[in-house]
Structures are given as C-alpha cells and as structure tokens.
Image (cartoon, rainbow, N blue to C red):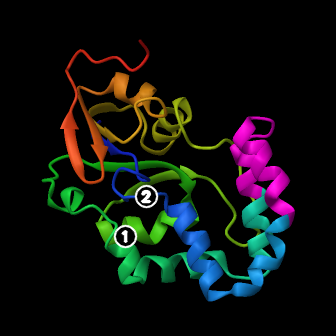
C-alpha cells in the first residue's frame, strides 16, 4: 500500500501539542499545579537521559488523570480556536491522492480529535490509557513509527514523508520516495538521495 506520512508536532501542528495541552489544562484546572513540583526530578531525569521520555510522560499524565478526564480535555483543547490556529494551513491545502497516516510521539488520546478535524483516518501515536494516563509500550518515534504503521495497515511504501526533525524521523525519511522538511508552515523538499542516517 502506498501512503503519505506526516509527523504531527512541529510539522502539521506548529509547536508541541503535548506541552500546549498541559498548559491548556493548567489554565482550566489551576489545582493541577499542586501536583507538578513532584515531577521536576523526573523532568530533569528525562532531559538528561537518566529516565526515558515514556517514563516522564507516564508520570505526568497519570498525575493529571487523577484529577481530570484526559480524553474530554483533549477534545476541548482541539475545539479551542487558538489550538486550531496552529494547525498548518499548508497541510489542509495539500492535495490528497493517497491514504494519509499521521505518525506522532504524542499520546493517541491527545491527537484523536485533531485527526478527525483534519480528516485523517489513520493515526499512529504513543499508546496510552486516557483514563489512567499510563503510556503503554514504547514512545512512538524513530523506528517504532515504522513498526506501528505496519501493525496498523500491513505492508506499506512511503511515497512522501513530512517532518520537522530529520533526526527523530530519519528511519521513515530514508524509506520515503519524497522527503519534506517542515518548519513553521514552510515546506522544503529535500534531495531525492538525502539519507538521514549519514
């Protein structure tokens, strides 16, 4: 199956949607702030590589899930005009003649409503339990995106890959026939012989 693949954060969405979702929830539920200081050592650990990003995200979302409904808050987040304004018009204006897959490290519960808004049927993100906030399995980045896409749709060939990070999405870029780098809504075609691994 031929597909076009799009990263989400920094690509379709101009920014980091997880950070923006957390800030959105903090504005709506200021009491969440009382639980955040306890996460600072884990954040430091994630930034220095002592703990995985998956472990930090799990700690963050499990703490939030004890006080709010993550799935409901995510939907409200995507209904907000400020959030929708950060969805790339370039993506919405790009003709679609092949199935589109969004592949992101953000939790699937967070992006589900965004994928609906954008008319994208196949969303691959980090698996997570929206009720408990617990992330399930690996953070969906790098080679894990390839594995998860194959698991969802079977054998596939990537015609075009759009990303803001050559490093994070190197494995998918190397598979793609056409490679695009996206920064703040500006799309740049990379050379056909571009290899992220070199």
- The tally of labels here is 2
What is the number of the mark on residue 116? 1
- Between 163 and 30, the residue placed more toward the observer is 30
Confirm whether residue 90 shows in the render.
yes
Q: Is residue 122 above or below residue 140?
A: below
Which stretch is magenta? 38-58
The residue pinned by badge 2 equals: 15
**Which quarter of the rendered picture does the N terminus lie within?**
top left
Q: Is residue 123 left or right of residue 177?
A: right
What residue appears at the point 44 percent right and 33 percent down from the top-left corner? 169
Marks 2 and 1, Cα distance to the nearest angstrom? Answer: 19 Å
When asked about the image quadrant of residue 48, the answer is top right
CB contact under 8 Å: marks 2 and 1: no
Residue 42 lies, in percent from the top left, at 81, 51
Residue drawn at (57%, 43%) of the image:
140
Relative image position of residue 13 (x, y in whole percent): 37, 59
| Quadrant, the C terminus | top left
**What x and y, as percent, mark residue 171?**
44, 25
- Observer-side mark, 2 or 1, equals 2
- Magenta span dominant secondary structure: helix
State left or right for residue 28 relative to residue 17: right
Dot 2 lies on which element?
Answer: loop
């Amino acid at each position: 199956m031929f597909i076009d693949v799009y990263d989400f954060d920094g690509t379709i969405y101009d920014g980091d949607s997880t950070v923006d979702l957390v800030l959105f929830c903090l504005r709506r539920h200021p009491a969440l702030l009382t639980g955040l200081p306890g996460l600072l050592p884990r954040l430091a650990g994630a930034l220095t590589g002592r703990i995985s990003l998956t472990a930090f995200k799990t700690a963050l979302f499990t703490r939030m899930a004890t006080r709010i409904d993550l799935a409901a808050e995510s939907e409200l987040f995507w209904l907000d005009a400020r959030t929708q304004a950060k969805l790339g018009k370039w993506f919405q204006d790009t003709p679609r003649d092949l199935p589109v897959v969004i592949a992101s490290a953000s939790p699937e519960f967070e992006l589900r409503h965004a994928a609906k808004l954008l008319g994208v049927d196949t969303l691959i993100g980090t698996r997570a339990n929206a009720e408990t906030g617990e992330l399930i399995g690996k953070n969906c980045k790098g080679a894990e995106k390839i594995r998860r896409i194959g698991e969802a749709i079977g054998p596939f060939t990537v015609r075009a890959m759009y990303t803001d990070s050559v490093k994070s999405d190197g494995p998918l870029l190397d598979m793609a026939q056409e490679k695009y780098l996206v920064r703040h809504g500006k799309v740049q075609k990379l050379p056909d012989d571009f290899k992220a691994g070199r």
